[in-house]
Image (tube, grey):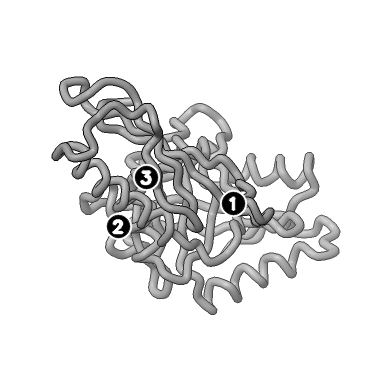
Amino acid sequence: MQEGGAHFLPLGDLKDRNGTLSPVTIIQFRPAPRLCKGWFDFGYSPKYRVRQSPNSNFGKSSAFADTLRTNLRSGLKHLRNLRLQSAAFQNAWVVDDLEAACNAWVKQLGVGPFFITDYAPGAFHSVTYLGAPSELAMRIGIAQAGPLQIELIQPITEQSAYRMSVPAGSGQGFHHIGIWTENFDQDLADLNGLGYETINAGRTRSTDFAYVDARPLLGCMLEIVTKTPLAERRFSEIATAAEDWQGDAPLRYA
């Protein structure tokens, strides 16, 4: 942890005196050594007020304390505002050879059919990488496994969120969890406000998407995708194809 950093630690639910459960988060903050020593712990719950821990050793009237309280309130506002409206719908892996990876899932796990699409450079609009204009190109295979969508990605563009966490030549590696959003700009801003950086972002004709580096929290990236009727219809078709699938045409090309 660098000086001035903060930890947000979900502790689960706390029972109040009436037996009501309320989620609690502990915020640990370490200021610069020149200001004071040690950690400060703050407890946060939507139901309860923020409290400074009794052993905090900085003056409550100091300018530093006022600044710290302001920064914490800002962080807690992000915690309260972050509302991803739907459950995760997708798990995604980065692979070196798309067809080989899809066939392995088909033969060894019985998952399929895989719908394969090539996204050449220029397929997406307004693409950024670490905030700068960029390109994003890849080949993907999508299949349904019960309630979960499986996405396998073979990157074409080397400078991407994919290769940031799964280097070329490393075989197959888990990359991200996909989550729908009904308020893309707000959810992305809230994730950024919690310290999770946007690695790639872009848009199709109807959908915005972004890969956020949530590895400190989840151990993987997080993709937020605008929930649109067009995307829902396409994914529904893929899920329907997997129902009672008997192994015919395991790889299907767009």
Look at mark 3 in the image and give the residue it sits on.
196
Q: How many marks?
A: 3
Let me know if residue 216 appears in the view.
yes
Classify residue 172 as left or right of residue 54. Answer: right
- Could you tell me which secondary element the residue under label 3 belongs to? loop
Note whether residue 94 is visible.
no
Q: Residue at x 36, y 65 (%)?
A: 186
The quarter of the picture where residue 64 lies is top left
Q: Quadrant of the N terminus?
A: top left
Residue 206 rendering spot, x and y as whole percentages: 42, 74
CA gap between label 1 and label 2 equals 20 Å
Query: Residue 141 vs residue 84: left or right?
Result: right
The residue indicated by pointer 1 is 151
Query: Where, by quadrant of the figure, is residue 165 drawn?
Result: top left
Q: CB atoms at circles 1 and 3 under 8 Å apart? A: no
Q: Which residue: 61% across, 51% down?
A: 16
Q: Nearer the viewer, mark 2 or mark 3?
A: 3
> Which secondary structure, mark 1?
strand
Residue type at mark 3? Answer: Tyr
Of callouts 1 and 3, which one flags the residue occurring earlier in the amino acid sequence?
1
Front tag of 1 and 3:
3
Q: Amino acid at mark 1?
A: Glu
The outermost residue toward the bottom is 229
| Amino acid tagged 2 | Val
Residue at (46, 39) in percent of width and height: 26
**Measured Cα–Cα span from mark 2 to mark 3:** 18 Å
Quarter of image, res 2? top left
Give the class, few, some or many, for how many residues have Cα within 10 Å of label 3's Cα (few <14, many ≥20). Answer: many
Q: Earlier in the sequence, mark 2 or mark 3?
A: 2
Question: Which of pointers 1 and 2 lies earlier in the amino acid sequence?
Answer: 2
Which residue in the structure is indicated by mark 2?
Answer: 127
In the picture, measured across the screen, residue 183 lies left or right of residue 88, that is: left
